[in-house]
Amino acid sequence: MDFTAIDFETANSSRSSACALGLVQVRDGVVTAEYDWLIDPRQRFDGMNIAIHGITPSMVKGKPTFAELWPTIEPLLQGEIVIAHNASFDMSVLRYCLDDSSLSYPDFKYMCTYLLGKKMLQELPSHKLNVVSEHFGIRLKHHDALDDARASALILLKLMEQWQQFDPLLLADSQGYKAGTMYAGGYTAFKASPKKAAKKPAAPKAAAAKTEIPVSPAVPDRGAPLVPTQRLTSSASLPAATPPAPEVQPLPELVRGQRVDIGDKLSASRILVSVEWDPTLSAMEPDTSAFLLRETGRCGQDQDFVFYGNMEDPSRSVFYSKPAPNAGHLHLQLAKLPASITRIALTFTLYGEASGQNPGQINNASASLIDSQTGNRLAAFPFGQGLSLETAVVIGEFYRHKDKWRFVAIGEGFPGGLRALCNQYGLEVEAPEAAAESAAESAATIETAEIVRTAGRIPPSARKS
């Protein structure tokens, strides 16, 4: 039962903007060491992120950068089994920070307690860290990096105890997951193991009796001579029947303003929206998100905004994942959505608006609608054409229409970036300066309380900050 749990907090939507890291070591099923660091990201702070974790620019002033801290962190990860809740986010933060500092990747295996919880605790209404922690009676100050890392560690221990497994990797394997890896030069994701292909049934043996079987001729071309019917016996070798080649349907490519019925032309209620683009410079970090809207055209609560910081809506009908740096996925179960949700706006945003970057600099940005049950690609929308200065794009919307869901391709740029989108859809987000100012008054109190809290639970030999 040896592993290490981590949790990152970021200053903004950039994965390279780590501003806090919590790390918890478990040996023989017991927490033996805890570490937490504030990190100076040398980047701007977004009001949205400050509202989530409460870390302000003044709190990281004078703290080490990630590159300066890495010689301390690396030995704690090297060769370990590393776990995190929503590991795809934390591992991407680690990779982006390493890439940004031109540092080599460490070697370790990793697991995600969020995905394990979804598989093993299906009775829960949600599998966010605070919900699973409450289920197991784990105290949590959510979005405190050390508290989140500790909760992730305790959740894994509870799951191992529940399933009588004493090896984290065996637990993952028992649930159909394969551990992710990070290694010098690359990584693999924590994901479901591929299912073994079913064996083909054995061909039936030929009957002993020699019964005459008529073989019909193929339908002739117009003007070709008819071929008379042949008669063969069952003891003869029958030629294998060649099924007609299926008619290849061209993939519908949508244009701006085009509308399609989900229940008709796109006959699927479980939809994967795969947004992809050509790889970009590390400073340009596009991402996808979804706003679940009411009849007013606005979100009813903060949790109706699904993005990297809130991967799932309360009804578990919309789920966010990021399978690659140049791709974002939104998984939709339209039939499960509450009746109060009448529209889902799909958006594409770009970190770096302050430095003049815009979606027009990204090549081949497109969204594909995929039937999650069959894997068939149903339609594609190349929304990146003609974009220029805007730092956000409304890709399109799913909306209810006469008891059906429809999709409209929009592809319109939206000035002001993600913050402006949030305001448009009824979510109040302070500007970074205002959020930092409002939080600065309590910063000293928070830091003092953190020192006292940390000193009470970490042995002196384990303290690193």
Image: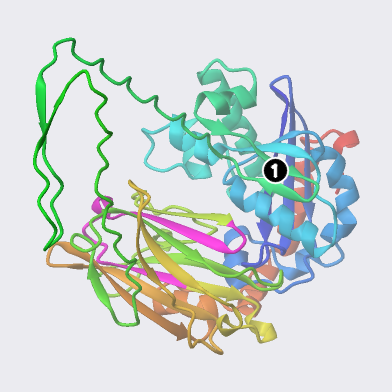
Does 343 sit above or below residue 189?
below
Horizontal side of 262 relative to 224 (left or right) equals right
Name the residue: 77% across, 54% down: 448
Q: How crowded is mark 1: few (under 14 residues within 10 Å), some or many (20 or more)?
A: many
Residue in the foreground of this view, choosing between 184 and 296: 184
Residue in the foreground of this view, choosing between 349 and 218: 218
Q: Seen from this angle, which residue lies furthest top?
A: 208
Of the 4 image quadrants, the one containing the N terminus is: top right
Q: What element carries label 1?
A: strand
Magenta stretch, residue numbers = 324-347
Percent of width and height locating residue 96: 72, 60
Q: Can residue 289 be seen in this view?
A: yes
Percent of width and height locating residue 196: 47, 29
Does 454 sit above or below residue 399?
above
Does 76 sit above or below residue 323?
above
Instruction: State the residue position of label 1.
Output: 6
Q: How many marks?
A: 1
Q: Can residue 295 be seen in this view?
A: no
Percent of width and height locating residue 436: 66, 73
Residue in the foreground of this view, choosing between 235 and 269: 235
Q: In which quarter of the image is residue 249?
A: bottom left
Identified by mark 1, the residue type is Ile
Q: Quadrant of residue 404?
A: bottom left
